[in-house]
Image (tube, rainbow, N blue to C red):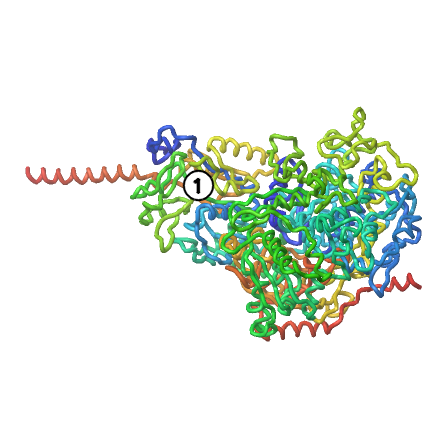
Amino acid sequence: MAEAHPVGFQWVMEAKRRGAKVFHVDPRFTRTSALADTYLPIRAGTDIALLGGIVRHILENELDFREYVLAYTNAATVVSEEFVDTEDLDGLFSGYDPKTQTYGQRSWQYAGHEKNSGDRDTHKERETAAGLRHESHGMPVGGQVQRDETLQHPRCVYQLLKRHFSRYTPEMVERTCGIPQDKFLELARAWTENSGRERTGVLIYSVGWTQHSVGVQYIRTGAIIQLLLGNMGRPGGGVLALRGHASIQGSTDIPTLFNLLPGYLPMPHYIDHTSFTDWVDSIRHPGQKGFWDGARAFGASLLKAYWGDAATPENDFCYGYLPRMTGDHGTYQTVLNMIDGKVRGYFLLGQNPAVGSAHGKAQRLGMANLDWLVVRDLFMIESATFWKNSPEVETGEIVPEECRTEVFFLPAASHVEKEGTFTQTQRLLQWREKALDPPADARSELWFFYHLGRIIRQKLAASDKARDRAVRDLTWDYPTHGDLVEPSAEAVLREINGYEVATGRPLSAFTEARDDGSTAIGCWIYTGVYADGVNQAARRKPGRDQDWVAAEWGWAWPANRRILYNRASADPEGQPWSERKKYVWWDADRGEWTGYDVPDFEKKKAPTYRPPEGATGVEGLAGDDAFIMQGDGKGWLYVPTGLQDGPMPTHYEPAESPMRNPLYGQQANPTRKVYDNPVNSVNPSPPQPHTDVFPYVFTVSRLTEHHTAGGMSRMVPRLAELQPEMFVEVSPELAGEVGLDHLGWAHLISGRAAIEAKVLVTDRLTPLRLDGRVIHQVWLPYHFGREGIVTGDSVNDLFGITLDPNVLIQESKVGTCDIRPGRRPTGPALLELVDDYRRRAGLVGGRPPIVTTDASEREVG
Amino acid sequence: MIEANSLYGPLDPAPDAGWTDAPPRMGFFTDTSVCIGCKACEVACKEWNGVPDSGFDLLGMSYDNTGALTANSWRHVAFIEQPRPAGHRTPPFEGNPTGPAASPASAATAAGTGTDTGTNPGLPPGRPDAATRMAAGPEFLGMPGSEPPGRATGAESRTDFRWLMMSDVCKHCTHAACLDVCPTGSLFRTEFGTVVVQEDICNGCGYCISACPYGVIDQRKGDGRAWKCTLCYDRLGAGMTPACAQACPTESIQFGPLDELRERAAARVAQLHDRGVPEARLYGHDPTDGVGGDGAFFLLLDEPEVYGLPPDPVVTTRDLPKMWKRAGLAALAMAAAAVAAFVGGAS
């Protein structure tokens, strides 16, 4: 966190000053480790084994916050008798289909619910990264569930969890992660001792945690621990995701993703969502409880914001204009489609995939096979110059004179040269003023898209083609100002907030959304940010002038709520768990919820409220159903539906690993997304042969001194001089084994590429002992490329493409490689080197076996 | 022996320099125990003061690619990797299959990588043996550095490790030798008690460079003038915090009236001692030290030498009065002898 989020890290230092204990788990000793109380080196890609060990420690020693767990989680819920755990199927859950490599989830359901939501097309869900839409809510489950409040039923979630993690012992953690048992127990004790009524603990992760073939399950495991310890919905608790750059939270709320519309409404699928009603019912699930009942109003209001007067209840609010998904349109599929000549044009805005995305060669070869490419950036980045300056130009794979892609480079305004909001990890929107005009031709994104849209609409104004109607009918009426004809960002924020169509009155809360066309809302979860016609995100009342929750600084979605599910900060009767951790509580005299924050609960619903038989929607939530966006109102220790790779996290090895999975015959995630393409290959892992060709683990991340793919730091002298060269960090033990010298050269080879780097021999890296074997890990920064003041090879070139099945995030934090002293060869000899490795590793096309256990056949048989 | 002159001993420098109604003396307290090595201070300083780059070379001294305070780097974050215990409750690498530490050997290698910073004397190559001792800590007695990293033989395995980080800066001495020797008056004492070079007066003679007991002030090549931290004199005049302190995310660099900072620093040391960090100590805070106390002082977690700081700096002009007195006496004696000889001859 000190490396990638130094400004945020000040609060960790502040907490430490007040006595907090800081634990840091990382493959290498970083600036965060230097300031932590305890540092745990870990083998990259084994976090579920570590966290699973903590879950076991909690359950075996009964250290869970039992009243919280009983009241607010699904621990007591009984699961279908059809369910079979990985413990019995050698690493697979019941329902696995080896043909599609996905699970049918019928058997994972709660008892009695098998038919309700278990028979979906999970293959299609994987293609469309359907898991992403659950960012603001869980998958639905229906009606009442069977519970055992004693937690003794063998199929209740508590017992299933206990059995599932029973083999994640401290010994197993040591064998899998390389973390000595004493250290593991130090972490486990600190975490559990600092949770409960009086204390809370927080889990902080950065985006690298998600970039694994089991990325979603990493976070799931963390969430299970935090639920068991009662650390959710309470002050000082939670699972904090530190985003990769400013407003990444904002860019999923109002998404730059192929499968989502604003406010986590799913992008329609061409088969499943043929009508408006099909679409909204797939979100709200009529007859189920929870807040998603409003989906029809949110959907109608969004379409009304898009198409204004043209959108009427009679024409389903122009639902037909919305594009439809037909499958996987994710960034990696698109790149492979480019290579295959299926894509004509591409916009890149503030992104440098030639350096920042996995498998740099695939990225560059893809971009070299377009008709046109628009790059908007502050500087001339590698993704704009790959056609004349890239490894492929050196090897002859791209010939500048013959490269067909026409690249348009448009200079962009920086964040100080435009106004707007940033949404950070707490869902807090903060308004940003413009400090100065952008130089020369540089313009804001808002300017670019507004005027692009304006010009396209002008060109189509006289068109009578049906296909152009969606563009012609768009509301595109933002006021502009100044010499640059800059559209008003506040006007956009007002539209995002939503307004009453007849009067233009800005809405104050998403509960005002209507499904009759009388409201227009750009993003329903942001409703309230422009309440009373005031830009609430621009509020800057200093902390000293308000209470510690500081509700008048900026604005947080939803409803300016600072902690989600904060009903859980009070006990089932509505009283604070402790004076020390008091946050939101039930005021019986006034008959309402009150506290420091906006209660995440219906204000007047008493803790004693129990829904009448058959109640649905919000009415169906009981007075102690704290997790109001979940179909059953409970925090999910066990996920009966909605995840591709299992209801409980399971340790799988990374797609490339030098180790056999110590826990199961199933080596890696059996549902991971793989692509069959000649450009993509995966280094062999056990039980395959030739794993000794790539014996070392490499992991990558950031340096404080640089920013992501380097486009904003390698070009700036004051930053570039601070970390001026590409380097690889190796332990003294590995340096001795391979023959590497401090400040000498080394080159690293994977099945995709070979890169070179200067060597830093440092005590900050350590070998790990696993199962009697010593595993070496190396670390590299991913900031370098061929443009700018300081240049170097790009480490992301070493990665292949393997994705998490839930959200299609790439596994780009762990891979295998070889490392040798000296510089890499250049020109065609570079290709020969990589080919030689590929031959020796047996990488002759095709993909590695996905299923490495015969358990699925046992199940079928 | 402290003598009663304004070149040595405790005093308030601004009134001593002739400022009437001077504001309280301002300074920096840099608490290295909370430094996270982000280098925001280096960047903010260069950005505000328009300081040019100091070369784009990988120095290999841990994450320090700045190397030293030079005319082109007025803040410098030092990184010291040591196989020594820190505040970690369990040694970071306990239980891992490690061999001997490489940090002394790596530091020794890095010490030979002096590069062109565009300044003079800039960043001269260090002495490998000194770097080795710094990286190993003061208790180190052996002689690694002769073996390449990782290839030393030895039964010991490293378990302890700590990574010290420290943002260094001009000390703004109470008795500033640079100022004392400046023949043009380019270096002057501000009303805040800080020491500033006026670039339009500096004639590039370089006397200040050899006078500084910390090796801070330095000459820019092609320009010839001496440059160093001004403690953001322009910002202070406008009631603002210096750029580095403003940018520091963890309040490792604190700015304020020196008296307040000294109190705060003493309390912080006491707090760290209570929390089991006995190695915490102050550096440059003492008005009775060889430079009369620094306007920019530090909380360190090891001996000053480990950070590359002189353990007992003395203002180089301390002995000037004594020297002048002796020279005067010698001259008088010579004259007396000459007179005596003349008188004697005449008699």
Taking the spot 75% from the left edge, 44% from the top edge, the residue there is A188
Residue visible at 68% across and 61% down in the picture: A463
Query: Looking at the image, can residue A352 be seen?
Result: yes
Horizontal and vertical percent for residue A348? 62, 59
Residue B118, position as x, y percentages in the image: 41, 56
Apparent side of residue A7 relative to residue B71 in the rendered image (left or right): right
User: In the visual, does A624 lie left or right of A339?
Assistant: right
- Examine the image and state in which quarter residue B104 appears: bottom right
Q: Quarter holding the C terminus of chain B?
A: top left
In the rendered image of this protein, does residue A469 appear above or below residue A519?
below
A852 or A808: nearer the viewer: A808
Image spot of residue A89 (x, y percent): 87, 58
Rendering coords of residue B34 (x, y %): 57, 41
Q: Which residue lies furthest to the left in this view?
A: B347
Residue at 43% of width from left, 50% of height from top? B70
Task: Judge left or right: residue A791 versus residue A609.
Answer: left
- The three-letter code of the residue at mark 1 reads Cys
> Where is residue A745, by image quadrant?
bottom right
Relative to the observer, which residue lies in front, A403 or A651?
A403
Identify the residue at image location x=60%, y=49%: A3
Vertical placement of residue A125 versus A148, above or below: below
- Identify the subunit bearing mark 1: B
Quadrant that contains the N terminus of chain B: top left
Q: Helix, strand, or loop for circle 1?
A: loop
For disc 1, the marked residue is B232
Seen in the picture, residue A533 relative to A337 is either above or below; the reply is above
